[in-house]
Structures are given as C-alpha cells and as structure tokens.
C-alpha cells in the first residue's frame, strides 16, 4: 500500500469516530455483560455448563445462528469492553479462532487482563515489523525443492498474512485506520496467487507437504477478513468476487496435493494433508468445484492413485470432483484410520513397509516419526530435540489443529478419541509420551490449544478413565513448560499465536468455542 492510500484510509476511518461513540453507547445497553474481573493467580479455571455446541460425548445439535447485532467495519469504539462480542454476527466460519473472539481478546487486553495483554502486544509487534519487510514476490509457478522454506511467498507469507488478519480484528474497534492497513496488506497477500492463477509444477519432491503445511494460513486469514468491507467496495470480503476467485483457485489448482498426501502417506505428511484438505473443503463448500486425483485401495489395503485419473498439474480433465462435505468427512475419517493403525503405506520409508505398524501407539509414540532417529518400535526418545522429538511434535501439531477445527464444527471426538479395543489413537497420549521423555517442546500453539481443550473437557468428560488422563496431562502445566523454556507467549511457527487465540486467565470460566455446522 502506498503512503497516499494509507493517508486516505486514515482520514476515512476518522470520520467514523463520532458515529461509533453513539453506536457504542446504544450497543452497551443491549449487549453488555459483566466486565472482566481481575484474575486471581491462585485460582483454577471454572467450567461453564455445556450448551449447544459444547464438548460432550453425545452428537451435537446443529448450531443456531447467532444474533444479528453488529458493528460497521471501520468504526472505532474504545468503550466496548463490556460488549458480548461472541454474540455479534459474523460471516466467518472460524478455524483456529474467529473475528469476534479476537475482538473480545483485544478488549480484555485493553483492560489489562493477562495473558491477553502480553499476547496481543507480541502479535501486534510482529505484525507491525512485517509491514516494514520487503514485499514478497509472487512466484511464476509453485515449484518446490526439498527445502520447506521455499518459496518464501508460502512459508514467510503464511506467517505475515495470518498475523495481519489477526491484527485487523484486534484493532478494528480501537484503531480502525491501522486495522484497515493490515486488512489491505493481508488481502494483497491472499490474492497474489489466485489473481494470477498460479499453477503447481508437479507432485514431486516436497510439493505435497509444503502446500499442505502453509496454504491453510491463507485460508484462515481470508476467513478472518470475512466481515471486512474494503475501502470503496459495497460487499464484505467474505461475499466478494475476491473470495470467489480464491475458492475457485483452491479447488481447481491446490487441493489435489494435500488430498494425495492425506491418502497415500502415513506420517506427518498425511497429518498436514488431512488438515489442509479439511480446511479447504470447509472454506470452499459448494462455491467452487474441488478437483483431485482418483484414489483406490490396493490388495494390501493401501491407497494408490488411479492411473485413469491422475489429475496432472495444470489439468482438470483427468481429475475427479469430490463434494466438500464428503471431502471434509473423509479427512476426519482418515485421521482416525491413521492413528488407529488402519491407514497403510507400504513404502521403503514407512513403518508399515518395514514390518512394524503406523499409528499412535497405546503408549503415545508415533512410529513413523520415531524412525527418523531410532526404530519404529523405539520406546524412548533420548535426544530432547533430535529428529524424533521434532517430527513427532510436527505431526501432532497438525492433528491438534484438525481436532480444534472439528470441535468448532460441533465435534470434539478427535480430541477425545482412543480405540477401546487396542488403546491406539489418542492425541493426548502422544503429548504425554513427549513430556514423559523430557523432549524440548517448542510447538507452543499446539500446547496452548491442548491446554484449553482439556481444561474445558476435564470438567464435562463422562468417561472417568479419560478424565484422569486429561487431568494428568494438565498437571504438567503446559503453558508453564513454554514459560520455563522462554518460549511464551507463543508467537510465530507453523501454527502461530497460540497464546493469543487459546490462552486464558486464571479463574476464567471456560466455554466451548463458537460453532458452525458442517457445510
């Protein structure tokens, strides 16, 4: 954005201030709740009674639309500390967080509540510094090496775009002019590849992994801008031609690569592939076709690509079309199949191929990540931040993100799953295994998500054995681990800003997150 445009937007935003103050006073009388109380450092979080969409062992009711009270985009309302932000209308679906949750977090930060204040400050510091960096160059094609950090438009851009979309929502009520700058920069980065219809060179090398790891941040960012109306436009981003262009590009060009990894791999590639496939399917819905390779199970019960439907790069003629609801459901089922040891990959590099088994073991070990440094059947991790420790965290990070998204669709079962017949498949045991092995835990956003879910679930869980395991995991003080390692509040990573999106104050009443129905 050039300086002239920035000044114009700041001037336009200032014109909203007077109207915003009047509007805020009206909203306060309608939407006010109890102001946040100062946290008691010695208190434990209390649990709200389960409501529609709360985490229980029973099927969830279809979430009802939230009330239609809303603030115009671009208004400044410094006095909104008491507004029930989560009751405001939003076009966003919500993946790891929602615009309204971020607005609530910003209000709590302005009141001085921790950990909100420090988490917001760190995020805004990062977002501001990123504005001063050189613009990332849109690649002519997505051609990948074995370096996960290339191209920078994906690896670095995924951090910037998510940070800017979060910053927009954090500032939209207190500094709309600066919020507008962040939204514009995020929009430019989101649309850089779809507007040029950038293609992917092939399925080779790290293509499937790199796309799967980074592309969902662009989707998260687009969703967080859903309510934002760009300057001079008459529709919010979520209903704009830009959003439609993005959805069409994701369905026609991108989703085939994580879809392949989700089905044909059993290690962290599959974990990230399942996550990205679910996110894209949920975001695109029926707005655009989703083109993928045909896959089938061979005689060894492993997925192979159908040679009649290779869905080659730059081509949709040889692809098959999968509807969004089916693709999303398949991603969740593939997760269960993988962690329970029912997803197979008989390659030279997999544990299945070496005579062991791919899964999350009953003790929490993940054989296909342990083999990177030890053997598939290793029961100890001696090197606290060697390959086995790092890759295990990398895999669980994607699984945790998928579990979080499913929870936000009314289904907490990925977080609580364990195969009762074998003891396999539990995410919570995989994290306990890492803690028991004293590994260096640096996937802080993952730990913050786990800490929030299990702190909530331990108060509503009906299975006493699971409840005891959740309590044992929480006894390690997961955010405290990050603090002791000077890695808190959690900042940028493959999954970013976890303290901001999932941290909570001591004594705070925890509730299940806002939910929307599966498309």
Image: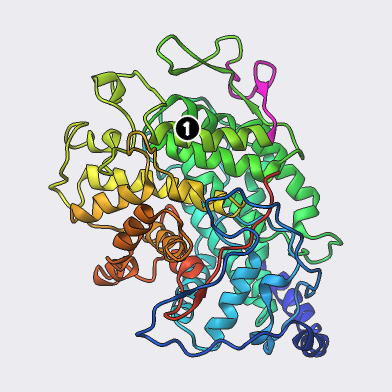
Closer to the camera, 254 or 11? 254
Does residue 499 appear left or right of residue 429 in this picture?
A: right
State which quarter of the image contains the N terminus. Answer: bottom right
In the image, residue 313 above or below residue 306: below
Closer to the camera, 419 or 404? 419
| Residue 311 shown in magenta | yes
State which quarter of the image contains the C terminus. Answer: top right
Most extreme residue toward the right is: 234
Residue 32 percent location from the top left of the image: 71, 85
| Range drawn in magenta | 310-324
Closer to the camera, 298 or 316? 298
Q: Give the residue number, with chain letter if any, for mark 1.
A: 208
- Asked whether the viewer can see residue 439, the reply is no
Q: Looking at the image, which residue is at 77% across and 63% down?
A: 230
In the image, residue 292 above or below residue 243: above
Residue 12 percent location from the top left of the image: 79, 78
| Residue 462 shown in magenta | no
In the image, residue 347 above or below residue 121: above
Does residue 39 appear left or right of residue 227 in this picture?
A: left
Residue 101: name its quadrant: bottom right
Main SS of the magenta part reads loop
């Amino acid at each position: 954005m050039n300086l002239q445009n920035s000044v114009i937007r700041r001037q336009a935003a200032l014109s909203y201030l007077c109207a915003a103050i009047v509007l805020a006073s009206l909203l306060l009388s309608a939407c006010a709740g109890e102001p946040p109380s100062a946290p008691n450092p010695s208190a434990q979080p209390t649990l709200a009674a389960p409501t529609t969409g709360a985490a229980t062992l029973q099927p969830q009711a279809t979430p009802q639309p939230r009330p239609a009270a809303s603030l115009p985009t671009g208004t400044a309302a410094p006095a909104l500390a008491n507004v029930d932000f989560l009751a405001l209308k939003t076009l966003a679906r919500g993946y790891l967080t929602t615009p309204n949750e971020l607005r609530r977090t910003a209000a709590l930060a302005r009141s001085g509540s921790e950990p909100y204040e420090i988490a917001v400050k760190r995020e805004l510091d990062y977002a501001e510094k990123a504005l001063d960096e050189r613009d990332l160059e849109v690649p002519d094609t997505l051609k990948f090496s074995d370096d996960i950090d290339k191209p920078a438009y994906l690896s670095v851009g995924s951090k910037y775009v998510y940070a800017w979309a979060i910053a927009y929502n954090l500032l939209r009520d207190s500094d709309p002019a600066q919020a507008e700058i962040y939204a514009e920069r995020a929009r430019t980065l989101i649309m850089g590849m779809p507007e040029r219809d950038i293609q992917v060179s092939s399925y080779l090398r790290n293509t499937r992994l790199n796309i799967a790891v980074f592309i969902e941040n662009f989707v998260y960012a687009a969703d967080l801008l859903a309510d934002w109306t760009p300057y001079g436009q008459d529709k919010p981003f979520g209903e704009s031609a830009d959003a439609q262009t993005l959805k069409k590009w994701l369905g026609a060009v991108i989703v085939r690569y994580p879809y392949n990894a989700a089905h044909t791999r059993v290690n962290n590639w599959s974990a990230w592939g399942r996550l990205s496939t679910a996110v894209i399917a949920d975001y695109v819905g029926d707005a655009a076709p989703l083109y993928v390779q045909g896959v089938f199970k061979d005689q060894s019960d492993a997925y192979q690509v159908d040679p009649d439907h290779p869905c080659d790069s730059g081509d949709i003629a040889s692809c098959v079309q999968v509807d969004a609801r089916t693709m999303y459901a398949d991603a969740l089922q593939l997760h269960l199949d993988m962690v329970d040891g029912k997803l197979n990959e008989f390659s030279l590099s997999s544990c299945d191929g070496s005579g062991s088994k791919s899964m999350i073991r009953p003790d929490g070990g993940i054989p296909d990540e342990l083999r990177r440094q030890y053997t598939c059947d290793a029961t100890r991790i001696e090197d606290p931040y060697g390959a086995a420790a790092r890759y295990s965290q990398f895999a669980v990070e994607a699984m945790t993100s998928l579990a979080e998204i499913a929870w936000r669709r009314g289904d907490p079962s990925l977080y609580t799953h364990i195969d009762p017949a074998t003891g396999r498949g539990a995410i919570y045991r995989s994290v306990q295994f890492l803690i028991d092995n004293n590994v260096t835990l640096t996937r802080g956003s993952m730990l913050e998500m786990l800490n929030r879910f299990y702190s909530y679930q331990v108060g509503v869980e009906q299975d006493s054995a699971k409840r005891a395991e959740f309590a044992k995991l929480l006894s390690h003080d997961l955010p405290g681990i990050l603090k002791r390692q000077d890695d808190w509040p959690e900042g940028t990573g493959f999954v970013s800003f976890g303290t901001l999106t999932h941290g909570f104050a001591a004594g705070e009443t925890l509730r299940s997150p806002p939910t929307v129905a599966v498309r």
